[in-house]
Image: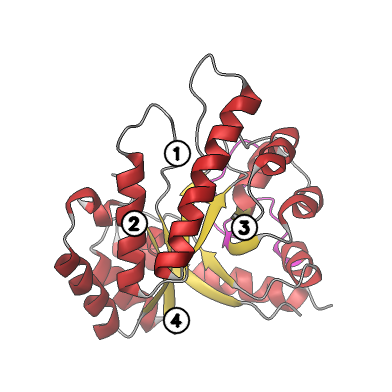
Amino acid sequence: MFQGKLIAASMVFRHFPLREAMKQVKAHGFDEMEVTVAGLFTPHFLHLHEMTENEMKEKAAEAGSCGIHIHALNIGAGFHPANTTIRSYHLQALRLAHAYNAEVVTLGCGGIQEGTDTIEGLKKIASYLNELSLIAWNEYGIRLSVEAPHRCTVSEKLEQIKTYWAYMPERLLCTMDVAHITFTGAPIEEVMQIVGNRLAHVHLRDAALGNSMIPYGEGKVDFANVFRLLEKYNYQGKCSLEFPAGEKMEDAIAAFEKGIQVLNEQREASAK
């Protein structure tokens, strides 16, 4: 049976202050979590660009006071050549992750400027991520990971995923979200053949074809099969429960508890 650890993502409690999210995570028996930084969608760090070192230390102390270790930071935004501030934003994210003593920082898979050849665009993304991954590891001891596949990006469909990873540097790792794989209808077994040996983190969310925002147990993701595949590829890292629940705390808690139940049951089922 898959032995990796299930943790929570702050995205589950995205409508509430981060301290409240951590309190709920702790109250449900978790001691680790992933912090999602995704603009207004998960507005816990809208001022990341301007955060000082002292503010970062205060956020780390806040997590410690709640008895929570921040294992990973998911900042969503990826490299795009037209974005002149993206590098400074990514460096700030690495500093915040370092303050948290996090182990993984996940970026978006990046974009290609309109009119640019796909392969040339991927080479630019790869060059940037190679440099950033070296900074992440050499200066902060952090593993840089990219969420690819991801819906509506340059790494969405199976052939795009193959091409994307064919051009990425060997040291770059992958954060795999099974919801984005299911969204496009790609066979997870084939995606795992591409990224299974690169995994740094895993997002577990239910989904169906064309819909990656489905409550646990109501979509088409075969989580038992996912757990078997993670075991097959000897993945021993963390898996985030990552469903963005409603604006009422009782709804968020109910969705969180349902996710815990479904994923634990499916982990057990994977051993049968």
| Upstream in sequence: badge 2 or badge 3 | 2
Residue 127 place in picture, x, y as percent: 54, 41
Residue 176 place in picture, x, y as percent: 62, 55
Look at the picture and state if 143 lies above or below 6. Answer: above
Q: CA distance from mark 1 to mark 2?
A: 13 Å
Q: CA distance from mark 1 to mark 4?
A: 32 Å
* Nearest-to-viewer mark from 2 and 4: 2
| Upstream in sequence: badge 1 or badge 2 | 1
Question: Residue at 49% across / 42% down in the picture?
Answer: 128
* Nearest-to-viewer mark from 1 and 4: 1
Q: CA distance from mark 3 to mark 1?
A: 17 Å
- Callout 1 crowding tier (Cα within 10 Å): few <14, some 14–19, many ≥20: many
Give the residue number, with chain letter if any, for mark 4.
30
Q: Is residue 3 left or right of residue 80?
A: right
Front in this rendered view, residue 125 or 19: 125
Q: Is there any visible trace of residue 41 in the rendered image? A: no
Q: Is residue 222 magenta?
A: yes
Q: Provide the secondary structure element on which disc 2 rests.
A: helix
Question: Residue at 80% across / 78% down in the picture?
Answer: 271
Asked whether the residues under the numbered discs 1 and 2 touch, taking CB atoms below 8 Å apart as contact, a structural biologist would say no
Give the residue number, with chain letter if any, for mark 1.
79
Q: CA distance from mark 2 to mark 4?
A: 24 Å
* Residue most extreme to the top: 115
Give the residue number, with chain letter if any, for mark 2.
93
Question: What kind of residue is marked 3?
Answer: Arg
Q: Provide the secondary structure element on which disc 1 rests.
A: loop
Give the residue number, with chain letter if any, for mark 3.
171
